[in-house]
Structure formats: C-alpha cells, structure tokens
Amino acid sequence: MANVGLEFNMDIKPNELRSILHEKIYFLILEKFQEYLNLLYVVDIPETAVKKIEADDVVDVSAEVCFLLLKRELQKVWFKDKYGS
C-alpha cells in the first residue's frame, strides 16, 4: 500500500526482518524521502513519535523508525485479533 517494494519469506527470523526493514528505511530516508513519508503515513506512525527521536545519525534514526513501524504493525495485529470478528 505504501508503494515500497519489499517481500519476505514466511519463515524469516525476527532479527532478519528487523535488519531488512532497517536497511530499507535507511535507503528511503537518504534516496526517496517522499516514499519514506508516505510509508509513515500508510503505516500510521504518529508524527509526534518520529519527532521525539533524538538520534543525530541517519542510521540511528532509521533504527528508531524501524522499531516504531514494527511496534505499530504489532498493535494493529493485536487490535484485529482482540476486537475483530
């Protein structure tokens, strides 16, 4: 939905997933900033959460955004499981 091409195998390990996402977010920040902003919007990461990131290095910022993305997706799964029909 965010028009960011990325595919995963169903048997991917959590650390591998985090690493791949981190690299992709890092790339988007440096090379395709508009797509990065679109990803944040589609995943529904609050702007306030991104503004609270205190890292100075793009690597650290992308790691924090990766965490926020994974956290938000987990929240969506949890809410769907708890309140879905």
Image (cartoon, helix red, strand yellow):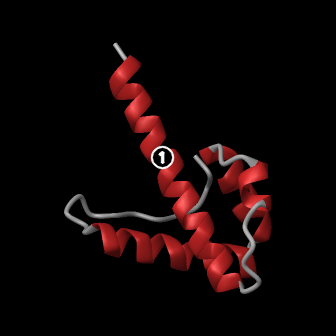
Q: Residue at coordinates 25% horizontally, 67% vertically from top-left?
A: 12
Give the left or right position of residue 32, taking residue 12 as reference. right
Q: Position of residue 53 (x, y in %)?
A: 72, 67
Q: Is residue 69 visible in this depiction of the protein? A: yes
Rendered image quadrant of residue 16: bottom left
Task: Give residue 4's position: percent from left, percent from top.
Answer: 58, 61
**Viewer-nearest residue: 14 or 56:** 56
- The amino acid pointed to by label 1 is Glu
Q: Mark 1 highlights which residue?
A: 73
Left or right of 61, for residue 80: left
Against 26, residue 68 (above or below) is: above
**Residue at horizontal 71%, vertical 83%?**
58
Give the answer, above or below, for where 70 lies relative to 12.
above
In the displayed structure, 28 sits above or below 69; it is below
Task: Report x, y in % for residue 35.
Answer: 72, 62
Within the image, what quadrant is residue 80 found in?
Answer: top left
